[in-house]
Image (tube, rainbow, N blue to C red):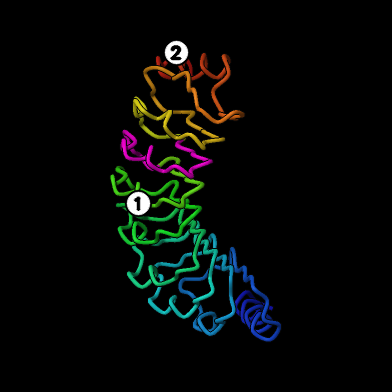
């Protein structure tokens, strides 16, 4: 049985059993099957590592969706209709073809988890501060040179990952991220690796070890690799 008939069977079973989660990862999809938009009970949809180029406006039919993952596709934009998914709290669009931060995301105030790693975005908007419910933000390998100072207004942020970018310095007031528990910032050309002091009692900040610092500096000086 080929992948087409397998995915049709999976969708049909989801419809009959009203299972809240649907996964069709690695199915070589070039578009989202229409049958999926009839699954109005659906709460979680994972379509990772396909070749989907377009997220249709029909996505608004999935009004109960709280998790949407489209990692590893060929998307370069989001439909404005996505902002009508008021229950959506988890959005993963990493490893796609976005060349700008989608403005639609800023209007999704309820988002708690956002992943946009390894796209072609080179700048984060100051308006990211409007995502006041955000708890986790993945922006690895998108080519940014700095973090907007406004990022410190994300008071509920617990996990921040900015690895593999071109960031030379962090916002001077980054310590205002008082709820931060995990911070990953390796493989950036930071002039100084900061001694971060957060006000929460038990921060578990991921900093480079002394060995990692030496390797990083050696790479920077072209002495190895």
Quadrant in which the N terminus is drawn: bottom right
As helix, strand or loop, the secondary structure at mark 1 comes to helix
Magenta residues (range)? 142-162
Kindly indicate whether the residue at mark 2 contacts the one at mark 1 (C-beta within 8 angstroms): no
Quarter-of-image position of residue 11: bottom right
Q: Nearer the viewer, residue 105 or 34?
A: 105
Instruction: Please give left or right for residue 67 compared with residue 30 in the image.
Output: right
Q: Is the magenta stretch mostly helix, strand or loop?
A: loop
As helix, strand or loop, the secondary structure at mark 2 comes to loop
Q: In this view, does 172 lie above or below 222?
A: below
Q: Is residue 191 above or below residue 31?
A: above
Q: Nearer the viewer, residue 224 or 23?
A: 23
Q: Which of 110 and 50 is in front in this view?
A: 110
Q: In this view, does 136 lie above or below 54?
A: above
For mark 2, what is the residue?
223
From the top left corner, tell me how far across and down residue 117 is, in percent.
Answer: 45, 47
From the top left corner, tell me how far across and down residue 189 is, in percent.
Answer: 38, 24
**Residue 68 among magenta residues:** no
Mark 1 or 2, nearer chain start: 1
Residue at the image point whose x is 43% and y is 46% from the top: 118
Instruction: Please give left or right for residue 122 compared with residue 137 in the image.
Output: left
Q: Residue 130 carries which label?
A: 1
Residue at the image point whose x is 33% and y is 47% from the top: 121
């Amino acid at each position: 049985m080929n992948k087409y008939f397998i995915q049709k069977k999976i969708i049909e079973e989801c419809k009959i059993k009203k299972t809240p989660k649907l996964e069709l990862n690695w199915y070589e999809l070039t578009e989202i099957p229409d049958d999926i938009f009839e699954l109005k009970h659906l709460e979680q949809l994972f379509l990772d590592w396909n070749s989907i180029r377009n997220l249709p406006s029909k996505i608004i039919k999935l009004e109960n969706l709280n998790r949407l993952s489209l990692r590893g596709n060929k998307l370069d934009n989001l439909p404005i209709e996505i902002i009508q998914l008021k229950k959506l709290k988890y959005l993963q669009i990493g490893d796609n073809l976005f060349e700008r931060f989608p403005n639609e995301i800023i209007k999704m105030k309820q988002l708690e988890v956002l992943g946009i790693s390894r796209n072609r975005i080179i700048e984060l908007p100051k308006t990211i501060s409007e995502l006041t419910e955000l708890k986790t933000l993945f922006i690895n390998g998108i080519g940014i040179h700095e973090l907007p100072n406004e990022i410190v207004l994300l008071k509920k942020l617990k996990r921040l990952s900015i690895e593999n970018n071109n960031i030379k310095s962090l916002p001077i007031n980054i310590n205002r991220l008082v709820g931060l528990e995990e911070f990953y910032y390796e493989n950036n050309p930071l002039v100084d690796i900061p001694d971060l002091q957060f006000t929460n009692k038990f921060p578990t900040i991921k900093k480079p070890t002394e060995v990692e610092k030496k390797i990083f500096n050696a790479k920077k000086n072209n002495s190895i690799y």
